[in-house]
Image: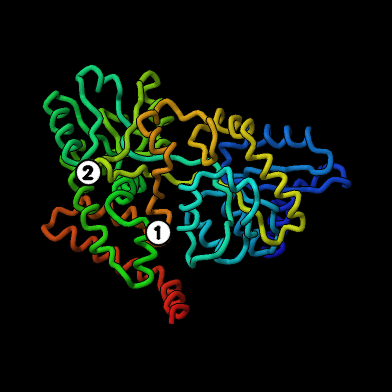
Amino acid sequence: MKCAKLMTALVSASCLLAGCASGPADDKIQIEIVSYKPEAAKVFEEIQDLFNETHDDIHLTINSPNEAMTILKTRFVREDYPDIVAIGGDINYSGFLDAGLFENLEGQPFLDKVKEGYRTIDKQLEFVPLEGDYAVPYVANAAGILYNRELFEEHGWKVPETWEEFTALCETIAKAGVQPLYAGYKDTWTTLAPWNAMAVELADPDICQQVNRGEATFSEAYDLTAERIRGLLDYIQPNPSAYGYSDAATAMWAIGSYAIPQIRSVNPDMEIGSFVMPATDKAEDRWLNSGIDLQFCVMEDSPNKEATMEVIDYLCQDEVMDLYLADQGGISCLKGDFAVPEELGDMKEYIESGKVRDFHDHYYPSEMAADAMIQTYLLDTSADAKEKFLKKFDTEWQRYNRDLIRRLQEENQ
């Protein structure tokens, strides 16, 4: 009885996603997109309606359900595939690609519109290097340091470009009686924000692949990242693990652009700026920590490949991108004269030049709980805290990636 009820619920959910209850005319090709961003449901509905108004032979349905990744994984197991998925550039994408679920889009004209930096990021997300392109990066986010422009202007503080300048600025801010940095490490995932922004500058972008191939260790590669993220504690409010993401920020916050709405909810009038994390000793060695927040992938089993390509080509039109950005914000992964959010103005040269590197945690298995390991390390006051943390990082990586590592070793024999 329980199994029957479960199957009924799954079928009902699938019908809801596919629009079974009240479908459009049968003479049109039906294309379904499932998006993992429920917060973008309204703008996707608008894009869907505009597409349908201008296409006589294709009917597009864009679904943005809550818990979309869970729903997608359930549908994949049942071989009930949508035509296109709209997902992030992270380890979920890597896993789906490794399972052979996505169509090779190599040679499609719309790929020429994608900035090379984000195409490179997608290639680096492949567990095993593949020929071709399997996603169309659409919108990205960025992480570094968000700061209070008014405070900086009032005191004449300059945006730092190196680690030495950054720590000196923190000292100056503290002497002015202002808390330099804020952290909400009670929410463990926030530890990944400064970690990622530093790691993209202090470690190789393919370090996870190097470790998988047995060519490197995290103990060596992440040594300086671990040292400098701990150095931030000298300038963060006392006991940062007692504060959460929803608490107010101060002069600076090592977090991503996704936190801007949170700051606005606490201080709607704050003039927010942002700059690339200055974790390096040389200004020219800095990289913007930017990852793919949304990309489109065509399912390999879609029976309507030509129509799916037409849909994606439409989504890549300038006016459609403008519509999405106006509603959701973010950074366009497509070439063109698209607006960069005012708050990210200090990052604009990196965005436009494509000097971007992906979030390192996009490669970390969720079971590894890297955020909790970082939080524990930052709370550890023992003399050998860094060594213990890095050793555990290597150990846990081997544990949760053992099948992939074994596979890579067998293929390279």
Q: Position of residue 183 (x, y in %)?
A: 28, 39
Residue at 30% over, 51% down = 199
Q: Position of residue 325 (x, y in %)?
A: 55, 32
Residue at 33% over, 39% down = 144
Q: Residues within 10 Å of mark 2 (few under 14, many from 20)?
A: few
- Name the kind of residue labelled 1 in the image: Tyr
| Label 1 residue SS | loop
Q: Circle 1 is placed at which residue position?
A: 364
Along the viewing direction, whichever of 279 and 282 lies nearer the viewer: 282
Residue at 36% over, 47% down = 189
Q: Is residue 240 visible?
A: yes
Q: Is residue 42 visible?
A: no
Q: Does residue 412 appear left or right of residue 249 in this picture? A: right
Q: Which quadrant holds residue 288?
A: top left
Identify the disc placed on residue 177. Answer: none
Estimate the spatial distance between the alpha carbons at disc 2 and disc 1, rounded to whole Å: 28 Å
Q: Which quadrant holds residue 169?
A: top left
Residue at 40% over, 45% down = 356
Along the viewing direction, whichever of 308 and 364 lies nearer the viewer: 308
Q: Circle 2 is placed at which residue position?
A: 282
Q: Residues within 10 Å of mark 1 (few under 14, many from 20)?
A: some
- Name the kind of residue labelled 2 in the image: Lys
Q: Compared to 310, does 237 lie above or below? A: above
